[in-house]
Image (cartoon, rainbow, N blue to C red):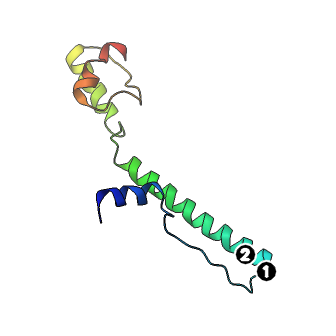
Amino acid sequence: MSRHDTDDRESNPLEGVELTLPETASEDEAAAIVAAIGAHVRDLELAAVAAAADGEESWDGKRWAFTGRVRGQQGRSVRVPIDAPTDPWAAAGRTDRF
């Protein structure tokens, strides 16, 4: 499998998937099957987004420590914004804006 194949599958998880409904399924049964599969696919998409977000750094548990470091180094209290850069060097360069 090439890298290109993997990227295609990640961007479209239903690539190459075929759905065949039973011929004896009523209209309501077919709608229920499609709704259940749609909900399952949506859950998979949400799980993938959540897994990708878990890989990003955040200030959770680190903001207070950084605030204490600024107080110790600069002698002033600051409030570190949630959207401040998580890279320590970048954040240190912006303490005048906190």
Q: Of the residues shown, which amino acid type is indicated by label 2?
A: Ala
SS for callout 2: helix
Q: Residue at x 46, y 51 (%)?
A: 49
Residue 77: give x, y in percent of width and height. Answer: 33, 18
* Residue underneath mark 2: 30
79 is higher (above) or lower (below) than 49: above
Tell me the residue that label 1 is attached to. Answer: 26
**Residue 61 in the image: x percent, y percent?**
34, 40
Q: Quick one: SS at disc 1?
A: loop
Q: Give the Cα distance between marks 2 and 1.
A: 6 Å
* Residue type pointed to by label 1: Ser
Q: Mark 1, residues whose alpha carbon is within 10 Å: few (<14), some, or many (≥20)?
A: few
Quadrant in the picture for the C terminus: top left
Q: Residue 2 at x, y = what percent?
A: 29, 61
Residue 65 or residue 3, whichever sits in front: 3
Q: Given contact means CB atoms under 8 Å apart, are the residues at marks 2 and 1 in contact?
A: yes
Does residue 17 appear left or right of residue 58 in this picture? right
The quadrant where residue 20 appears = bottom right
Residue at point 33%, 41% (across, down) = 57
Determine which of the numbered discs, if any, sits on residue 97 in the image. Answer: none
- Tell me where residue 43 appears, x and y as whole percent: 54, 61
Does residue 59 sit above or below 67 in this rendering? below
- Give the quarter of the image for residue 36: bottom right
Tell me if 10 is positioned left or right of 36 in this view: left
Tell me the crowding category of disc 2: few under 14, some 14 to 19, or many 20 or more residues within 10 angstroms, Cα based. Answer: some
Q: In front: 97, or 69?
A: 97
Give the residue displayed 48% in from the left and 61% down from the top: 13
The outermost residue toward the right is 27
Q: State left or right for residue 21 relative to residue 41.
A: right
